[in-house]
Image (spheres, helix red, strand yellow):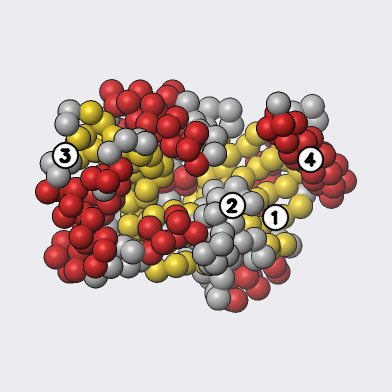
Amino acid sequence: MEIIKREQAAEFDAFVKSHYKASFMQGSPWAGVKKNWQWRGVISRGEDGKIDGTMALLIRKVPGMPYSLMYSPRGPVCDPHDRAMVKKLVDAAVEVGKEFNAYVLTMDTDIKVEDTEFANLVKSLGFTVDSTTQSFETIQPRFVFRLDVEGKTEDEVFGAFASKHRYNIRVAKKKGVEVKICGPEAAEDFHKIMIETGKRDDFGIRSTEYFRSILENFGEDARIYLAYYEGQPIAGSLAIHYGDKVWYLYGASSNEHRNVMPNYLVQWEMIRWAIETGCRIYDFRGVSGYLDESNPLYGIYRFKKGFSGELTEFIGEMNLVIKPFAFQLVTCGEKVYKKLRTVKRKLAEKK
């Protein structure tokens, strides 16, 4: 097994991009975005010397403690049913953890919940698996919408959308909405729309620098799609193409001109990117698994569902506890922190 740093990752990244388990978070460009984390890549090679499995690791020190969290987002990249391979990669990750005094290895691979073979495999390696979360309690969403675009034409994909979605896309075009493909130069305009969206829908937002960092680190594999109406940007999304997938990462819309349906046209243009680049999957990312219209998050589900993707439930977050005492200590500390944060927020709302 080999352990590499980011500057040695050219061959590593080429393998990840070529694999059907590819994720942009398993590529080394993601390390450039996550600047507060250390990055290491684990490589396995076959007898022919070629890479046959990888695992990207993000490591971050726990504030105020001598321990570190070690996290492999959507990893590893290999045949997930090859127990020997998965074990080799996990064992190597644990060795990396010694350098950083890691107390746990966390993974959240995009394996469907019904794949009991994989669940049993990781449990046999000592992992606990949490398949109970319903919304966004974990680092990555457990429920996502995915659209199969492999081998399909634009007409075939568009024709499968809900009739209302097709209508709204046509409305946007008829009203003169224009979607432009942009790079880092559009990060500030996108951020301004994100601020409006965050205030309206009550969620925190990333900084302009964060969005710009994604675009700069992924280069041509990342885009901002900005929708303009009467010369002004009114909606936008940030997408990444990596391997055989395009991901919709962030979306925003202005409080003005929502009647011209810019978000629908932006989504369609990003889906077209996935089709043009020969992808298998367009990934809408997270939704809540609590599918009740009373759920405040139901609107996100309804919007994504109309594009005729598949609601996909993943196995969930997996933890291999390396230092049991430290794990309990950090877990208790996180619970206290979350309670204090909730109290602080409620007090602020009363003012």
Residue 346 appears anywhere in the view? yes
Determine whether the residue tagged by mark 2 lies in a helix, strand or loop: loop
Residue located beneath label 2 in the image: 136
Q: Are marks 3 and 4 in contact (CB under 8 Å)?
A: no
Say what amino acid the circle numbered 3 marks.
Glu
Q: Nearer the viewer, residue 97 or 108?
A: 108
Question: Percent position (x, y) of residue 134?
Answer: 61, 61
Q: Image check: 182 left or right of 305?
A: left
Residue located beneath label 3 in the image: 178
> Residue at 30% of width from left, 43% of height from top?
258
Give the spatial CA distance, label 1 vs label 4: 23 Å
Determine whether the residue tagged by mark 3 lies in a helix, strand or loop: strand
Residue located beneath label 4 in the image: 339
Give the spatial CA distance, label 2 vs label 3: 32 Å
Sequence-wise, the earlier of marks 2 and 4 is 2
Give the spatial CA distance, label 3 vs label 4: 45 Å
Question: Percent position (x, y) of residue 151?
Answer: 20, 67
Q: Are marks 1 and 4 in contact (CB under 8 Å)?
A: no
Give the spatial CA distance, label 3 vs label 1: 45 Å
Say what amino acid the circle numbered 4 marks.
Lys
Mark 1 or mark 2: which is in front?
A: 2
Sequence-wise, the earlier of marks 1 and 4 is 1
Say what amino acid the circle numbered 2 marks.
Phe
Give the spatial CA distance, label 2 vs label 4: 17 Å
Say what amino acid the circle numbered 1 marks.
Asn
Mark 2 or mark 3: which is in front?
A: 3
Q: Nearer the viewer, residue 268 or 170?
A: 170
Give the spatial CA distance, label 1 vs label 2: 17 Å
Mark 3 or mark 1: which is in front?
A: 3
Q: Which image quadrant for residue 235?
A: top left
Q: Image check: 74 left or right of 271?
A: right
